[in-house]
Image (spheres, rainbow, N blue to C red):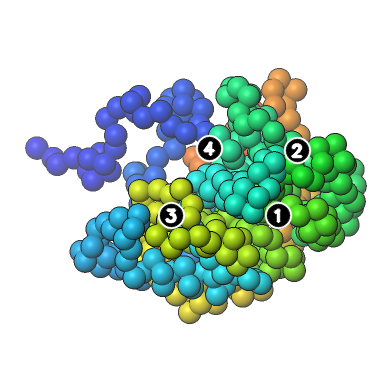
Amino acid sequence: MPMPSSAALNAPNDLEPFWMPFTSNRAFKKRPRLLASAKDMHYVTPDGRQVIDGSAGLWCTNAGHNRAPIVAAIQAQAAEMDYAPPFQFAHPKAFELASRIAALAPGDLDHVFFCNSGSEAVDTALKIALAYHNVRGNASRVRLIGRERGYHGVGFGGVAVGGIVNNRKQFGALLAGVDHLSHTYNRAEQAFSVDQPEWGGHLADELDRLVALHDASTIAAVIVEPMAGSTGVIPSPKGYLQKLRSICDKHGILLIFDEVITGYGRLGYAFAAERYGVVPDMITFAKGITSGSVPMGGVLVRKHIYDAFMQGPEHIIELFHGYTYSAHPLACAAGLATLDLYREEGLFERARKLEKPWADAALGLKGLPNVLDIRPVGMTVGIDLASRPDGAGKRGFEALDAGFFDHDIMFRAVGDTLALSPPLIVSESQIGEIFDKVGRIIKAVA
């Protein structure tokens, strides 16, 4: 009797119990896009097809898949110590990793609070902002300001300051006291811009309008993504982030950059804050810190914020917040090995060198059927396709399916926007392969 293939042994026998996140479950389970293994730039399907990863997993495998040094570090740590409690105890790698991350950050972003995801990082940053004003005697500063089309994870705080309607509409009133800046995208003014568009910096002035409406004495923090990724890759216009920094300084408001996507080389630097020359008061990070190998996130905090909590009796807890798995030993080991890879292989610098060929290849799709805009920034790009008359998002979903099943490529489909962000180890020939495939897919779904 012939033995079943390894692919058959690894195939799930029932897809129904797993309620998949951010997925059209019924459509997926009729035609599942399953992955069995991964290495460097590729996933491998259960039937053995190699699929080039055009999205770094979920914006996170910046150093590529299953890199040997990261795997070895995780294995060694698991054999040495599986878990250490982060409340009132700690392990050395947590301090080593925090020091390494702080050294990468610009300005005096000298302190790191660890968590396990971008969503937790955002809610942590928002809580730190509220608590900071409270301990300084400004308890009336409770209002939080996000931005339309912003994505800040799925916690109640992150959804409240986020501005993507489908992420908000099912969950009631969320947090009170939240307002939003206008988004910064205007296709008529910005179409086919590379990096930061020339038009739109003036939109930061809207923060002054919100201050006039609510009064600065009620506003704790503003949170924005330097590049809004999950809504379809929208870079901040020239001068926009600098204006936000200036207005926040004028009114004593904290400025938070959500760099869960842009952190760790995605835009050619450790953080987008460095690329754009703006030091926020906090930076949230996740994804690339372990190249997606172990869940981890965190918040970088400026020295004056940390110092504001370090008052009073030394035996008293300064911030009543944290997670069971903050600074988990396996995550810290993975993070240290990942930072070593970034440094030893010069992946941030490599991303900067590849930025132009990446943008040139992306813009080569201009003029294909239904292409409305192409927005390259760093090692990302958003490609807007015209919606089908019978429903928004259908063309994007068809492109996602065609990519996986017919062209052996993975990318993100955000409605009718295709979002690409490959591992930073991508070669120039693989960039050509990626956009050749995307071009054929766009023609196929015309």
Q: Which mark is residue 180?
A: 2
Is residue 367 toward the left or the right of residue 100 in the image?
right
Distance in Å between CA atoms under marks 3 and 2: 33 Å
Task: Give the x, y percent position of residue 189.
Answer: 90, 47
Asked which secondary structure carries label 1, the reply is: strand
Which residue extends farthest front? 313
Q: Nearer the viewer, mark 1 or mark 3?
A: 3
Which residue extends farthest left? 1
CB contact under 8 Å: marks 3 and 4: no
Q: Which residue is mark 1?
A: 255
Task: Give the x, y percent position of residue 89.
Answer: 31, 60
Q: Which residue is mark 4?
A: 155
Query: Is residue 92 among what the camera can see?
Result: yes
Asked which secondary structure carries label 2, the reply is: strand
Distance in Å between CA atoms under marks 1 and 2: 14 Å
Q: Nearer the viewer, mark 1 or mark 2?
A: 1
Q: Amino acid at mark 4?
A: Gly
Which residue shows up at 51% across the image and 27% down it?
A: 24
CB contact under 8 Å: marks 1 and 3: no
Distance in Å between CA atoms under marks 1 and 3: 25 Å
Q: Amino acid at mark 3?
A: Ile
Q: Earlier in the sequence, mark 3 or mark 2?
A: 2
Q: Residues within 10 Å of mark 2 (few under 14, many from 20)?
A: many
